[in-house]
Amino acid sequence: MTKLVVNDIHLGYGTVPVLQGVSFKLKAGEVVSLLGASGSGKTTLLRAVAGLEHPSQGNILLDGEALYDAARGIDQPAERRSLGLVFQSYALWPHRTVAQNVGYGLVLRKVPAAEVKARVQAALDNLGLGHLGERYPFQLSGGQQQRVAIARALVYNPPVILLDEPLSNLDAKLREEARAWLRALIVRLNLSALCVTHDQTEAMAMSDRILLLRNGRIEQEGTPQELYGAPQTLYTAEFMGSNNRFEATVDQVGADEVRLQGPAGSLLARSRSPLRVGDKAQVVIRLERVGVADEPGPNRMQARLITSMYLGDRWEYLLESSGLRLRAFGQQPREAGRDYWVDLPAEACWAYAA
């Protein structure tokens, strides 16, 4: 069942276009992340769904009801859209207790006091905050403040919850724990959620689908596995993961494979866009697919190890071959200044039109 439909949304500030025809659907119980670089339009899109920004074209439907429809002149205000919204800054009232923060919107809606108390307590219990209702925000950790903001969004039992960079204010260690906890909460409560993030790891960990935005348009849409393992464009390939990239010239063309002449010799690659002999191609390969060997072999290039860096769970190597610098991961320290063979599996080398 589809909860939210966004169709052909256009929005700009003056003569500057921000959203240029964005369309997508959010199913019931699904988590969709809006992922992209700064300025891609992801936060503006979320705010348009929330009713905090006003598009110039398109329509937005929630359970079949128009929240916004340019052709029909419908633009419901944010307070009538009944969507749960979690801000990046949490936006908690410092002079109100946790319980008062969570229940404030219900009080404004003139919900009976007994029902407010019961719903606030239920929301806090769901997030492991039931014992903190009388504390003030300054008495809470960053992770606890985040949970209060989410409780405030959930207390209405909204059909869709909107999350704007919900983990960005947490330190790196707590952010890793929080994304696992938040994903578990969303699944347990069977929430439909639309989440903005610039962190690809966060998007992949939390989402059923990802919409990668670029310059106000959807560059690619799909599951985390599809965007990471089968990027349709050079931009998607580069945005997702940690990569090596270099330019080469197409020497031979097969059904789905090409032979390239690069800075350090010949290699095979999987073609990801139409290529002809003589074309320049951009080659992308994920760091974890690059190997370092002691002997030559198919699709290997000789390179000198510049340095090894210990990362705890693995080593990262920096190598150079004919002016081309490559990075790779491995499980053992290697001696700098020596020559090795960099293994570039053909199926993991993706060639795109330059």
Image (cartoon, helix red, strand yellow):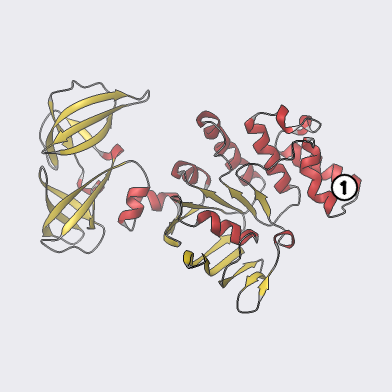
Q: Position of residue 288 (x, y in %)?
A: 30, 37
Report the side of 352 relative to 120 (left or right): left
Q: Nearer the viewer, residue 100 or 293?
A: 100
Occupied quadrant, residue 305: top left
Indicate the quadrant containing the N terminus: top left, top right, bottom left or bottom right. Answer: bottom right
At 64% from the left and 51% from the top, the residue drawn is 191
Q: How many marks?
A: 1
Residue 230: tell me if it is visible: no
Vertical placement of residue 22 versus 197, above or below: below
Indicate the quadrant containing the C terminus: top left, top right, bottom left or bottom right. Answer: bottom left
Tell me the crowding category of disc 1: few under 14, some 14 to 19, or many 20 or more residues within 10 angstroms, Cα based.
Answer: few
Vertical placement of residue 10 versus 187, above or below: below
Residue 87: tell me if it is visible: yes
Q: Position of residue 285 (x, y in %)?
A: 26, 45
Report the side of 182 relative to 40 (left or right): right
Q: Nearer the viewer, residue 127 or 212?
A: 212
Occupied quadrant, residue 291: top left
- As drawn, the residue found furthest toward the front would be 14
At 67% from the left and 32% from the top, the residue drawn is 144
At 71% from the left and 40% from the top, the residue drawn is 92
Q: Position of residue 324 (x, y in %)?
A: 16, 40
Vertical placement of residue 48 versus 311, above or below: below
Q: Position of residue 209 (x, y in %)?
A: 49, 54
Name the residue beneath numbered marker 1: 115
At 54% from the left and 34% from the top, the residue drawn is 175
**Amino acid type assigned to the residue bearing label 1 in the image:** Glu
